[in-house]
Image: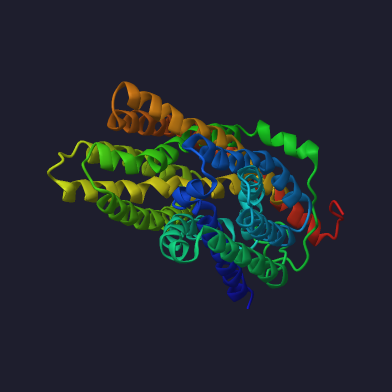
Amino acid sequence: MRSRYRWFVVAIFFCFMLLHQADKLLIGPLTTPIMDEFGINEAQMGAVSTGALIIGTIFYPLWGYLYDRFARAKLLAIASFIWGATTWISSRARTFGFFVGSRASTGIDDSSYPGLYSLISDYFGPELRGKVYGLLQVAMPMGYLLGLILATVVGQALGWRNLFFITGGIGILLAFVIWFGVKEAPRGQAEPELRDLEQIGVYRFHWREALQLFRKRSLVLLFIQGFFGVVPWNVLTYWAFRYLETERGYDTGQATVVMGLVVLVLAAGYFVGGSLGDMAFKRTRRGRVYVSTFGILMGAIFLFLAVRVPMDNPTLFMILLGITALFMPFASPNGAATVHDMVAPEMRSTALAVQYFIEQGGAALAPLAAGLIAVRSSLQTAILATCIGTWLLCALFYSFIARSLPQDMEHLRQLMRARGEAALQGQPADD
């Protein structure tokens, strides 16, 4: 029963991530009708997305702390309610200033995922986490496609305000589903040293221990790697469509088909990468790092080969681009699982929130850096320089992470063994 229930929780969280991502990304394909209604220019419209990104970045540390201090399931329900309520408010905005403020407030819930992964880590042990995280992360590219469909079909039929009203309502509905349907799991119950115990101690977040996270060499290197690791994602997300149109001669329809197919392959890559990471992890503690490194190196190789394909061979270009998309996500589920492989259960939301906070810096700088290179050269050069350059840098960081990771992981295993022995002896925990 417990095994079936945990997959029920995964299904709820998959729906949450899928629909939340769709709502979050609706703003892109709805840009033109929104600009027309408010009579604004591109710079003003850019402020709408920037505001949400800034708010989301600021709230990462706060969400991480709250998740490690309080019930994660209830907080996720609150995050879903905030998503729905802020989207509803933005759908009713009658002035551009109010619209900017209300859309910026939608960023509050955009940084709520660390608690979701932390809660899932207490339902699934280390040997399955990569696969489960990969499955959940499939929802993100699929959310992009769903958002595109909703914007072009429902948005055109009902208008952007009514579409936001619908997606906001879905967020509020999911809030009730999570509040009443998802149970809080004891922190650490899925760890190998604790999973067979009837009762385990309750351990709470402490700032003193939280600061010790920055003494874990592997974790700090993983944080730094994350700053560079998100650069290719954001460069390709922002510039790939224009590259297809301006430098490869695709019309809008052809570019849309290509990007749609790439997103589908990309979605599969999350699950494949997470599954391979779990398999490698069972053989060696460095397994997830090896799979992540393999993925980014293969992504770099096939992206280079793809953009070098002559214009008169679109089939080969599509094949190589698809292979690139398959390898690109390998590091994502394995990165989250690696954080949880060396961080105590009551600190995991904070650790992942710090990683995502740092990644936002790389995400913000990536489109600008590529744009500056493109002005002086070409988009092809910009994409190759930023993506391949940062992927190679990430591979270097992973080589250092692999050296120190077993030691940092062993510290966690020792801690879990000590907690297991304390539980068997009936010794009190933090409570």
State which quarter of the image contains the N terminus.
bottom right
In this view, the residue farthest toward the left is: 312
Q: Report the colour scheme.
A: rainbow
Q: Measured from the top left, where is residue 11 in percent x and y? A: 55, 69
Residue at horizontal 17 percent and vertical 48 percent from the top = 314
The residue lying toward the viewer, choosing from 73 and 342, is: 73
Q: Measured from the top left, where is residue 4 in percent x and y? A: 58, 75
Q: Measured from the top left, where is residue 369 in percent x and y? A: 43, 27
The residue lying toward the viewer, choosing from 408 and 114, is: 114
The residue lying toward the viewer, choosing from 82 and 228, is: 82
The residue lying toward the viewer, choosing from 237 and 31, is: 31
In this view, the residue farthest toward the top is: 376
Q: Measured from the top left, where is residue 82 in percent x and y? A: 69, 56
Placement of 178 over or under 24, stated as above or below: below
State which quarter of the image contains the C terminus.
bottom right
In this view, the residue farthest toward the bottom is: 1
* Residue 243: quadrant of the picture: top left
Is residue 9 among what the camera can see? yes
293 left or right of 380 in image:
right
- Count of residue discs: 0
Residue at horizontal 68 percent and vertical 68 percent from the top = 182
Residue at horizontal 14 percent and vertical 45 percent from the top = 313
52 left or right of 308 in image:
right
Residue at horizontal 42 percent and vertical 48 percent from the top = 330
Is residue 129 among what the camera can see? no
